[in-house]
Image: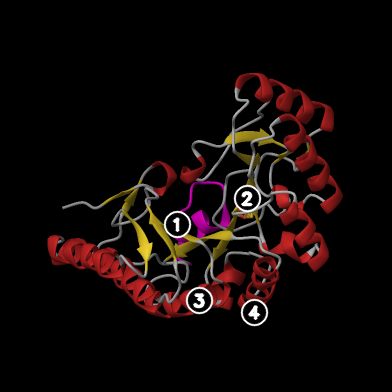
Amino acid sequence: MHYTGTIYRPPFESASLLLQVTAGCSHNRCAFCTMYRDVPFRMEPMEQIERDLDEAARRYPHVRRVFLENGDPFVLSTERLAAISERIHERLPEVETIAMYASVLNIKTKTDAELRALRALGINELNIGVESGLDDALQAMEKGYTAAEAVAELTRLREAGIDFGANVILGAAGAGRGPENAVMTAELLNATKPYLIFTGTIHADPGCPLYENLQSGAFTESTVGEYLDEEETLLQCLDIDCRYFGLHPSNIVPMDGRLPADRETLLAQIRAAREAFTPRQLASRPRRYGEGAVVIED
Ligand code: SF4
């Protein structure tokens, strides 16, 4: 299989066949993201995709799920995505789902009929960085859409039968605004009904605007206690049936459950963490390591 640069995938796609159909990200300007800063966006040649599928057919003939790479393959035209999907089904007849990263901006470029046609070809369960329901946070993160636009596009996606998992960022609005971010993000998610919510806390590596803003003090990160309060509010406000996946290393409390069934269990985990931390720890800001992994010092 042909892969260039770093290949990213959500943790729940660990059993999927990873098929590279693009390099980089067509947007490549979110303020917190360094994933593809030095990778110019491009489409992979169809001959290469076909060679990879031929190899996959020999090595993994019974694969049932494919995850298209890289940053936002859903930006490809409907014709291109349809041609890739057809080649997948020709060579891997047991494939049921073709998933990928996508953005709200990608959905905008497709008509309702095109979205339905892509769903009919097995494209489903897109992973979308929704991030926040607060317009000023979305603007500061340079996402390129408003919360209302996100609701409109994600609703079109769902009405075409395409499910999506939503990535959301706790602390996206910064210190002192956690509950506000949680309420507005829950409102967006309740309106659009993702099948999965993937949470992480805000963090940045060198080489992106958010890192500079954290260093200069232009953006103040939430404290440990504020992160816990924000996630508690988010869980209380969510009114949908979905998986709540909080196992990103940047989370203060690792958790994974279903809503609404596991809501009280997840809330109890947050409350237990709050009781376990000292007042000083709750008032501190987490130390970060790779992928934003948190360490809370004594
Ligand atoms: S967060 Fe996603 S959409 Fe934004 S620049 Fe990074 S890969 Fe692209």
Q: Which of 167 and 240 is in front in this view?
A: 240
Camera sees residue 1: no
Of labels 1 and 3, earlier in sequence is 3
Left or right of 220 in this view: 268: left
Q: In this view, does 15 lie above or below 230?
A: above
Which residue position holds label 3?
A: 190
Left or right of 71 in this view: 240: left
Q: Residue 215 carries which label?
A: 1
**Residue 164: percent from left, percent from top:** 58, 60
Q: Distance between the residues labelled 4 and 3?
A: 13 Å
As helix, strand or loop, the secondary structure at mark 1 comes to helix
Which residue position holds label 2?
A: 101
Which residue position holds label 4?
A: 148
The residue located at (66%, 19%) in the rendering is 58
Check if mark 3's residue and mark 2's residue have beta carbons within 8 Å.
no
Q: How far apart are marks 3 and 2 (CA)?
A: 21 Å
Camera sees residue 261: yes
Q: In which quarter of the image is the N terminus?
A: top right
Kind of residue at badge 4: Ala
- As for residue 119 lying within the magenta part, the answer is no
Q: Distance between the residues labelled 1 and 2?
A: 29 Å
Q: Which of the two discs, 4 and 3, sits closer to the camera? A: 3
